[in-house]
């Protein structure tokens, strides 16, 4: 610690330059945290939450729109296949609560089957029983209930954007009969579970159809047999299907947006490569300006190794502190940004994974060494006579 004042004085020798360098590093690692948060967060979500024992059956023609629906008659035929444990159709009601900024997604499902397909979903048995008794009932996610202040017994008016009610409006009214949570994934409990039969009977168009059919297998290793068997059932029907396990389905959906990993790695690599030259130039300039002072320190008995260490520590402090601030800002802003995108994106509960901080720390350390070592090595090799002579 006795050398810290010397290091601190070297850092702030040119205050404006140090501040701008700090801001550059903070910005670079903020971008690193945000972009890697998307990439790593999606991977973490896929690995933690999605299950190869679950299949998603969608239209082979088109996943969205009128061409992308499946008749619910498919459900009974799929359920009859060997190796299928549970099946539910799903139809989505996309809308908002009270105002357009309060976007919500209601999933019309067979609730009993849903909780078998997703055993990580948790709700009291009394509330599940109330859901069976109440056709217009709703099980709301715990995170959504916290956000909107919903309680069991509340009326839940929703304005739909995609499903017209039998009265000719897009107004829907449900009764909250329970609150579900998701084991170890509380922040993702943002949607509303509705009774498929009620939604199906009350809507004007697309009756007896589903956007997707969810399937749980008895043995996930049987996917290679059951998946093709499902598609074979409907190969010659007007509504052919495409069956994927849940991980493959989500991954293929993400790939339609683009290669996220390639985009993120490219941007982060370019930013850090530019930052390396900026920081290295700052350190070299700082050492050049202090050549006479370094010569005096050597005259006073400071060893070459000690001076090399002091310059490296200076680079480490500059880089690691700035990187820490950038990653901290990313960890605070990223979840808020994901929530602001709404439930339609499905990433409301996403946070910056811990692995991003670990990689960020390693990146900051390597950046500090790569940018500081040339300057530190020059300080180490400096000859007292040449320095004092201005050479």
Image (cartoon, grey):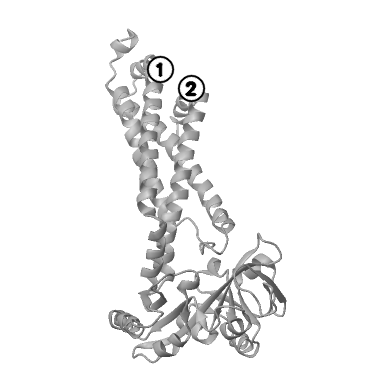
In the rendered image, residue 304, in percent from the top left (x then y), is placed at: 29, 25
Q: Is residue 335 above or below residue 77?
A: above
Q: Secondary structure under badge 2? A: loop
Q: Residue furthest top?
A: 389
Q: Quadrant of the N terminus?
A: top left
- Would you name the residue on which mark 1 appears? 289
User: Which residue is nearer to you in this view: 197 or 299?
Assistant: 197
In the rendered image, residue 154, in percent from the top left (x then y), is placed at: 72, 77
Q: Is residue 222 above or below residue 358?
A: below
Q: Which mark is residue 13?
A: 2
The residue depicted at 66 percent of the width and 80 percent of the height is 166
In the rendered image, residue 216, in percent from the top left (x then y), is placed at: 41, 82
Instruction: Characterize the local packing of mark 1: few (<14), some (14-19) or many (20 or more) Cα atoms within 10 angstroms.
Output: few
In the rendered image, residue 81, in percent from the top left (x then y), is placed at: 35, 90
The residue depicted at 44 percent of the width and 49 percent of the height is 35
Q: CA distance from mark 2 to mark 1?
A: 9 Å
The residue depicted at 39 percent of the width and 55 percent of the height is 258
State which quadrant residue 130 falls in: bottom right
User: Which residue is nearer to you in this view: 200 or 47?
Assistant: 200
Q: Are marks 2 and 1 in contact (CB under 8 Å)?
A: yes
Q: Is residue 129 visible?
A: yes
Q: Which mark is residue 358?
A: none
Q: Secondary structure under badge 1? A: helix
User: Which residue is nearer to you in this view: 171 or 18?
Assistant: 171
Q: Is residue 322 visible?
A: no
Left or right of 97, for residue 322: left
The residue depicted at 40 percent of the width and 30 percent of the height is 278
Instruction: Characterize the local packing of mark 2: few (<14), some (14-19) or many (20 or more) Cα atoms within 10 angstroms.
Output: some
Pick whichever of labels 2 and 1 is earlier in the sequence: 2
Left or right of 90, for residue 356: left
State which quadrant residue 202 falls in: bottom right
């Amino acid at each position: 610690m006795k050398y810290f004042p010397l290091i601190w004085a070297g850092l702030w020798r040119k205050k404006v330059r140090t501040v701008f360098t700090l801001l550059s590093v903070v910005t670079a690692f903020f971008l690193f945290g945000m972009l890697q948060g998307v990439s790593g967060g999606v991977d973490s979500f896929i690995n933690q939450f999605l299950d190869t024992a679950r299949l998603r059956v969608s239209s082979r023609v088109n996943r969205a729109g009128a061409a992308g629906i499946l008749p619910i008659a498919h459900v009974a035929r799929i359920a009859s296949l060997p190796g299928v444990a549970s099946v539910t159709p799903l139809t989505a009601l996309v809308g908002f609560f009270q105002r357009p900024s309060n976007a919500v997604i209601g999933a019309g499902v067979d609730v009993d089957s849903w909780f078998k397909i997703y055993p990580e979903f948790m709700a009291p048995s009394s509330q599940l029983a109330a859901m069976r008794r109440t056709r217009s009932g709703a099980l709301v996610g715990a995170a959504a209930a916290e956000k909107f202040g919903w309680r069991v017994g509340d009326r839940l008016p929703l304005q739909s954007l995609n499903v017209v009610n039998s009265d000719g409006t897009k107004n829907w009214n449900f009764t909250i009969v329970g609150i579900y949570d998701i084991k170890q994934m509380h922040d993702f409990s943002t949607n509303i579970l509705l009774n498929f039969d009620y939604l199906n009977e009350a809507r004007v168009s697309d009756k007896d159809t589903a956007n997707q059919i969810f399937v749980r297998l008895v043995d996930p290793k049987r996917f290679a047999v059951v998946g093709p068997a499902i598609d074979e059932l409907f190969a010659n029907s007007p509504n052919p299907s495409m069956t994927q396990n849940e991980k493959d389905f989500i991954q293929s959906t993400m790939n339609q947006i683009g290669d996220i990993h390639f985009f993120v790695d490219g941007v982060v690599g370019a930013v850090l490569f530019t930052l390396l030259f900026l920081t290295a130039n700052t350190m070299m300039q700082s050492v050049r300006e202090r050549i006479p002072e370094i010569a005096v320190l050597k005259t006073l008995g400071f060893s070459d190794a000690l001076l090399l260490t002091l310059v490296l520590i200076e680079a480490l402090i500059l880089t690691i502190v700035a990187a820490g601030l950038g990653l901290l800002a990313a960890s605070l802003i990223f979840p808020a940004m994901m929530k602001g995108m709404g439930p339609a994106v499905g990433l409301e509960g996403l946070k910056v994974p811990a692995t991003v901080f670990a990689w960020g720390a390693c990146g900051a350390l390597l950046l500090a060494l790569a940018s500081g070592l040339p300057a530190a090595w020059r300080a180490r090799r400096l000859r007292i006579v040449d320095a004092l002579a201005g050479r």
